[in-house]
């Protein structure tokens, strides 16, 4: 869906969207495709790329805010499609920071010896849940569908500075901002799960205070990058690649400016993908690999911010 395609169904323009967000187009699925379908494609590619069989996976961690159904979690639907019954399968519901939370969870499970080979997926189908009338234009133009996956495997780390592994992750949240970006209904907070009035008001669509999100995103992402670097005794100059959550090009540029990053070390996909929430960071990693910007041995920092508010970072020796 290009910006011009959107302008045909709502009162918006390529100029407005591109100027304020850097987004030119986004992918929206067809009517039959689900979030777990997208996840299956990403997972299958990641498993093949890792050179393992699906049966080698002993845990699935699935980050999404747009599951196929209210319950069970999407990890279970993906598990059935991958035909790997019996292993633990869990969802992470941390929105745009979902992939960082999922990586942190998988890393922790490996470190304590509860898992050896974890499939970590971030996948979203936003398009089916957006208000594509004029009322929802401030939110709908920002989001795209997508999926990405990685396979994390246990490894002996003799030298934490140089050996390939998840070096560190940092997680944060501030629930006092929960209603700055949220999907109010349906929910068990109400007398009934969803009411006719709520539909009429559009409370079944995402609601966002864009300025508050913007202000906090440009503060929290650099903060958590600085935190993870200083806690691990590395500097910005030591990092080969930065992958930031792709919500808005202006946010990414402000974060890169604050951290004084050279543009060639920052991956951007926003112009083609828009905001794919939990799928964003693995899509960026995949793009960086395809472009030859991410190779074994490189030091990578990923950081995200989103609804919750949640934010966090990860430091990877690739
Ligand atoms: N097309 C045309 N006009 C629009 C659209 C649209 N799609 N959406 C809103 N407008 C109008 C509004 O009605 C308003 O009009 P008015 O001034 O007549 O009332 C005007 O545009 C608002 O314009 P600005 O105030 O200039 O908008 P702003 O510069 O604040 O940009 C934006 C809005 C892009 C949403 C910005 O606040 C933003 O990016 N915030 C961050 C939100 C975000 O990234 N959310 C993603 C999820 S969270 C995350 O992933 C980090």
Image (spheres, helix red, strand yellow):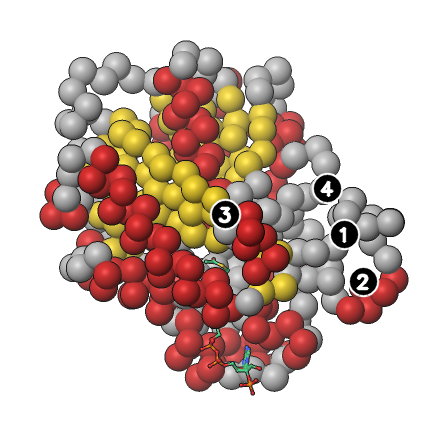
Q: Is residue 41 above or below residue 53?
A: below
- Could you classify mark 2 by the number of other residues whose Cα lies within 10 Å: few (under 14), some (14-19), or many (20 or more)? some
For the residues labelled 3 and 4, say whether their Cβ atoms are less than 8 Å apart.
Answer: no
Dot 4 or dot 2, earlier in sequence? 4
Dot 1 or dot 2, earlier in sequence? 1
For the residues labelled 1 and 2, say whether their Cβ atoms are less than 8 Å apart.
Answer: yes
Label 3 or label 2, whichever lies nearer to me, is 3
Q: Secondary structure at mark 3?
A: loop
The answer for how far apart the CA atoms under marks 4 and 2 are is: 18 Å
Please name the residue that numbered disc 3 is placed on.
174
The answer for how far apart the CA atoms under marks 3 and 2 are is: 26 Å
Place of residue 196 in the rendered image (x, y in percent of width and height, measured from the top left): 87, 62
Please name the residue shown 43% across and 65% down the image.
214
For the residues labelled 3 and 2, say whether their Cβ atoms are less than 8 Å apart.
Answer: no
Place of residue 175 in the rendered image (x, y in percent of width and height, measured from the top left): 55, 48
Please name the residue that numbered disc 2 is placed on.
198
Please name the residue that numbered disc 4 is placed on.
70
Please name the residue shown 43% across and 52% down the image.
305
Please name the residue shown 58% across and 29% down the image.
90
Q: Is residue 41 visible?
A: no
Please name the residue that numbered disc 1 is placed on.
186
Asked whether 110 or 77 is in front, the reply is 110
Dot 3 or dot 2, earlier in sequence? 3
Q: Secondary structure at mark 4?
A: loop
Place of residue 100 in the rendered image (x, y in percent of width and height, measured from the top left): 42, 40
Q: Is residue 256 above or below residue 136?
A: above
Asked whether 316 or 31 is in front, the reply is 316
For the residues labelled 3 and 1, say whether their Cβ atoms are less than 8 Å apart.
Answer: no
The answer for how far apart the CA atoms under marks 1 and 4 are is: 10 Å
Residue 205 lies left or right of residue 39; in this view the side is right
């Amino acid at each position: 869906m290009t910006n011009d395609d959107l302008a045909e169904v709502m009162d918006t323009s390529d100029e407005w969207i591109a100027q304020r967000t850097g987004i030119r187009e986004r992918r929206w699925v067809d009517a039959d495709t689900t979030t777990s379908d997208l996840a299956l494609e990403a997972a299958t590619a990641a498993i093949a790329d890792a050179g393992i069989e699906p049966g080698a996976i002993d845990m699935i961690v699935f980050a999404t805010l747009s599951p196929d159904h209210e319950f069970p979690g999407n990890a279970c639907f993906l598990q059935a499609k991958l035909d790997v019954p019996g292993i633990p399968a869990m969802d992470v519901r941390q929105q745009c920071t979902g992939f960082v939370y999922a990586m942190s969870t998988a890393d922790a499970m490996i470190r304590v010896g509860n898992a050896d080979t974890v499939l970590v997926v971030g996948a979203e189908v936003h398009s089916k849940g957006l208000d594509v009338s004029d009322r929802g234009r401030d939110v709908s133009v920002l989001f795209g569908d997508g999926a990405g996956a990685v396979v994390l495997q246990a490894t002996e780390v003799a030298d934490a500075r140089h050996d390939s592994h998840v070096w560190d992750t940092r997680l944060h949240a501030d629930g006092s901002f929960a209603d700055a970006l949220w999907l109010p209904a349906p929910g068990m907070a109400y007398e009934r799960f969803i009411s006719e009035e709520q539909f009429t008001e559009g409370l079944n669509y995402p609601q966002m205070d864009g300025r508050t999100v913007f202000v906090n995103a440009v503060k929290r992402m650099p903060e958590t990058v600085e935190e993870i670097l200083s806690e691990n005794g590395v500097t910005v100059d030591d990092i080969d690649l930065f992958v930031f959550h792709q919500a808005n090009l202006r946010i990414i540029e402000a974060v890169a400016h604050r951290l004084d990053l050279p543009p060639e070390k920052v991956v951007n996909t926003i112009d083609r993908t828009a905001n794919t929430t939990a799928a964003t960071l693995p899509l960026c990693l995949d793009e960086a690999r395809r472009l030859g910007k991410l190779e074994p041995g490189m030091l990578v920092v990923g950081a995200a911010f989103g609804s919750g508010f949640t934010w966090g970072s990860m430091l990877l020796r690739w």
